[in-house]
Every structure is written in structure tokens, then in C-alpha cells.
Amino acid sequence: MLTKTKKAKVIDAVKIHDTDTGSPEVQISILSKRIDELASHLKKNAKDNHSRRGLLQMVADRKAHMKYLEKKSPKRYASLVKKLGLKK
């Protein structure tokens, strides 16, 4: 689970301005953190199919946000991929 402090750290790493909570960069980074945590949960609990479904939904949501950001601003997209260590 993503606690408030973990979420704040993730937001601080990629925010564009001081009150940024909804930019594509922030949303993608929060989703990436949640995906990482859920993936580690599923390694321990392989039969948890409900969580697996949620993971797949989050991955699809992150992909849609990344596609939007790549279309709107390729420069911001490239810097975010580099920051988060994501592959295209």
C-alpha cells in the first residue's frame, strides 16, 4: 500500500510546480510505485488473482497516461522515462 509519506516522496521527485498533484508525470510515477509494490506482493502470493487483475488495470492506465504524455510533449516524456527508469 502506498502511504502518504511514500506518495509525497514520489510526487516531490517529478512535480512540475509546488502544488502539482495531477500532471501526467505525477500520475505515471504514482502508478509506477503502486505497480512495483503490487508486483512484489504477487511474487509472494501467486494465487491472488484479484490483485493480479488490479495490477493489469494499473499497467493499462499507466500506458495510456504515457501515450498521452508522449503525444503532448515528447521532451517531458523522455525525461520522465529516464527519471523512472521505464522502457518504452
Image: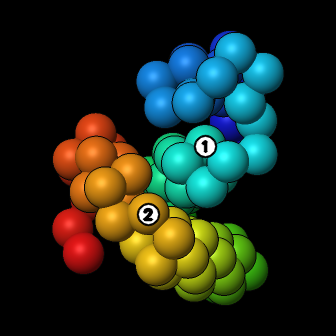
| Residue 34 in sight in this render | no
Mark 2 or mark 1, which is nearer the start of the sequence? 1
Nearest to the observer: residue 65 or residue 69: 69
Q: Position of residue 5 (x, y in %)?
A: 68, 15
Instruction: Answer above or below: position of 46 versus 79.
Output: below
Q: Position of residue 55 (x, y in %)?
A: 59, 73
| Circle on res. 26 | 1
Q: Position of residue 78 (x, y in %)?
A: 26, 57
* Residue with the mark numbered 2: 73
**In the visual, does 10 lie left or right of 54?**
left
For the point 72% across and 30% down, which residue is it? Answer: 20
Instruction: Answer above or below: position of 88 versus 60.
Output: above
**Label 2 element class:** loop
Q: Amino acid at mark 1?
A: Val
Nearest to the observer: residue 36 or residue 86: 86
Quadrant position of residue 87: bottom left
**Quadrant including the C terminus:** bottom left
